[in-house]
Image (spheres, rainbow, N blue to C red):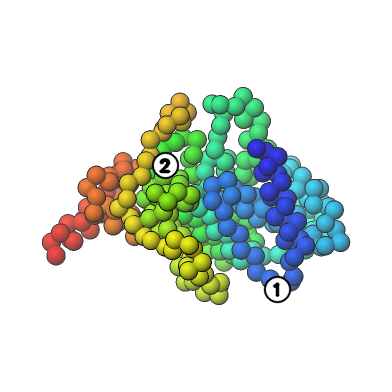
């Protein structure tokens, strides 16, 4: 598992090193483990820079320096490495769906004796985005209760005054936001549509063609989803801490609350129940 993560990050890094031309815009997207991968890739680019093609052999060294917690991006060693072997480049947009686990990946310690050592190497240095990222978008699920799938937030970098980060909450569990099953596509299509619409509103010029999706985009915020713990009941239950900002709730949350009286997740009700009920009453009075 760990070697797979190492390989994926370094493969993506090498691709960018070999193909990037000054003036190109870099967009990174990922769901779950893929979200961890692209967020780590962004951190590596910030710390080690992008190598020039002639220095691509330095990629393993660049990766190990990125993983080192003793070497910071502003240390002289890293400044000289970036200057000698490559360049610092911006990342136009980072788009993620439900980055999970307090370490960026599911915490498997109840199952794997070596998990703590594993997580020490692979956990995020912090949840703040690298300052080279210009825009960050994160779609997260409200109803995921498996403790090992706790969400990793996307926080704005304190080193950037212009970085824009938007984290929005959606109804459903991990797979309801990131997709993967036809049964939950009515919900996951909503998160996909939000990602595309948000990029359009930013005005980056990146265009999407929904017709490329064989089944199209079919929004259905009322469908059932299964949030039973299953085998993960042995690892515990944890309700996610939802944003205090009501505007961070996607419209699908409001619509589902209004149409399904049985949809009253405790974490949502405790934080935003009064406001949602007020909207429901106003609708019923019309």
Residue at 62% x, 40% y is 123
Q: Residue 8, position in %: x, y?
A: 68, 48
The residue that label 1 is drawn on is 23
Which label's residue is closer to the chain start, 2 or 1?
1
Give x and y (percent) for residue 7. 71, 46
Residue drawn where x is 48% and y is 69% of the image? 211
- Above or below residue 255? Residue 119 is above
Assess whether mark 1 and mark 2 are in contact (beta carbons under 8 angstroms). no
Q: Is residue 280 left or right of 240 when viewed as pictured?
A: left
| Mark 1 closeness class: few <14, some 14–19, many ≥20 residues within 10 Å | few
Residue at x-position 52% and y-position 70% = 208
Dot 1: element: loop
Instruction: Measuring from the top left, give residue 31's x and y in whole percent.
Output: 54, 51
Name the residue rendered at 42%, 58% in the picture. 189
Q: In this orientation, does residue 62 appear?
A: yes
Label 2 to label 1: alpha-carbon separation = 40 Å
- Can you name the residue that lies furthest to the left here? 285
> For mark 2, what is the residue?
144
Q: How many numbered circles are shown?
A: 2
Name the quarter where the C terminus is drawn: bottom left
């Amino acid at each position: 598992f760990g070697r797979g993560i190492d390989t994926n990050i370094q493969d993506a890094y090498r691709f960018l090193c070999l193909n990037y031309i000054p003036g190109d815009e870099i967009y990174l997207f990922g769901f779950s483990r893929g979200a961890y991968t692209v967020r780590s890739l962004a951190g590596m680019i910030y710390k080690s820079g992008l190598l020039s093609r002639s220095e691509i052999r330095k990629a393993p060294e660049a990766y190990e320096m990125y993983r080192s917690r003793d070497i910071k991006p502003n240390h002289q060693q890293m400044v000289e490495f970036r200057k000698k072997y490559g360049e610092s480049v911006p990342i136009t947009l980072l788009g993620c769906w439900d980055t999970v686990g307090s370490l960026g990946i599911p915490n498997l310690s109840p199952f794997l004796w070596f998990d703590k050592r594993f997580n020490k190497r692979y956990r995020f240095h912090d949840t703040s985005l690298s300052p080279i990222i210009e825009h960050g978008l994160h779609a997260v699920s409200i109803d995921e209760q498996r403790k090992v799938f706790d969400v990793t937030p996307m926080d704005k970098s304190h080193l950037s005054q212009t970085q824009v980060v938007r984290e929005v909450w959606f109804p459903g569990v991990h797979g309801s936001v990131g997709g993967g099953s036809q049964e939950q596509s009515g919900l996951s299509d909503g998160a996909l549509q939000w990602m595309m619409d948000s990029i359009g509103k930013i005005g980056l010029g990146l265009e999407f063609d929904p017709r490329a999706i064989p089944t199209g985009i079919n929004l259905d915020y009322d469908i059932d989803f299964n949030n039973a713990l299953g085998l993960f009941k042995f690892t515990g239950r944890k309700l996610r801490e939802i944003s205090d900002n009501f505007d961070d709730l996607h419209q699908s949350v409001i619509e589902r609350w209004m149409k399904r009286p049985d949809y009253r997740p405790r974490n949502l009700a405790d934080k935003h129940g009064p406001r949602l009920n007020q909207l429901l009453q106003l609708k019923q009075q019309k």
